[in-house]
Amino acid sequence: MVFLDRDGTLNERVEGYVDRPDDLRMLPGAAAAVRRLNDSGARVVLVTNQRGLATGRLTPEAWLAVSARLEEELAREGAVLDHVEMCPHADGQCDCRKPLDGLFRRALALAPWAEPSRCAGVGDMPSDVTPADGLGMRTLLLGTDVDDLASAVDLLLR
Ligand SMILES: [Mg+2]
Ligand SMILES: [Zn+2]
């Protein structure tokens, strides 16, 4: 199972929140990289913090609309997310906001066959890989360990 961050990993990071579907711009090669994971048989899990839902900067409708666009953009390349775990909470209000590991643990609980040591976490921020590392997963930090998601998938599938 491969745990992917969203902004800065699949799509471009923007100032503030991606709150309109048209603001979601896929990073080059990201959707194709997800399809390669799909083709390999690995489950792909999106793990994303969306604190804007707690502060009111992001409405539930906007989250759903942007999520739908993400699925469309992935589908264009034949890629799918097998599962999504999202933290809608403010800082310090939960056990799931990354760098805490609740999103990862929830997904693992739904996939008891998944060995953490055979899973990986990929993201563009240390807070994306901290929880994966803590659970014993392999981690790849974009911009540090590898350039982008395509390179990360090259390594994971090697
Ligand atoms: Mg990110
Ligand atoms: Zn949370």
Image (tube, rainbow, N blue to C red):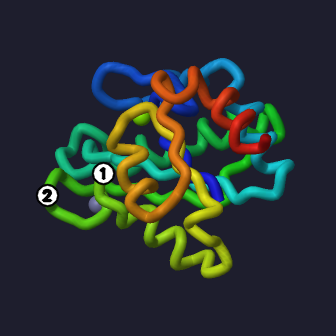
Residue 49 x/y as whole percent? 35, 48
- Above or below, comparing residue 9 to residue 5 in the picture: above
x and y percent of residue 158 in the render? Answer: 79, 41
Q: Nearer the viewer, mark 2 or mark 1?
A: 1
Amino acid type of the residue tagged 2 in the rendering: Gly
Q: Amino acid at mark 1?
A: Pro
Crowdedness of circle 2 by 10 Å Cα count: few (<14), some, many (20+)?
A: few
In this rendering, the answer to whether 42 lies above or below 69 is below
Residue drawn at x 74%, y 57% as measured from the top left: 42
How packed mark 1 is, by other alpha carbons closer than 10 Å (few <14, some 14-19, many 20 or more), is some
Circle 2 sits on which residue?
Answer: 92
Give coordinates of residue 124: x percent, y percent: 44, 31
Residue underneath mark 1: 99
Element carrying mark 2: loop
User: In the rendered image, which quarter is residue 41 located in?
Assistant: bottom right
- Residue 66 visible from this viewpoint: no
Which residue is nearer to you in this view: 122 or 110?
Answer: 122
- Res 110 quadrant in image: bottom right
- Res. 119 visible in picture: yes
Please state if 158 lies on the left or on the right of 151 as rendered. Answer: right
Whereabouts is ligand 2, in terms of quadrant? bottom left
So how many labels did they put on this image?
2
**Residue 89 as seen in the image, left or right of residue 48:** left
Name the spot of residue 26 as percent of width and height, x first: 60, 24
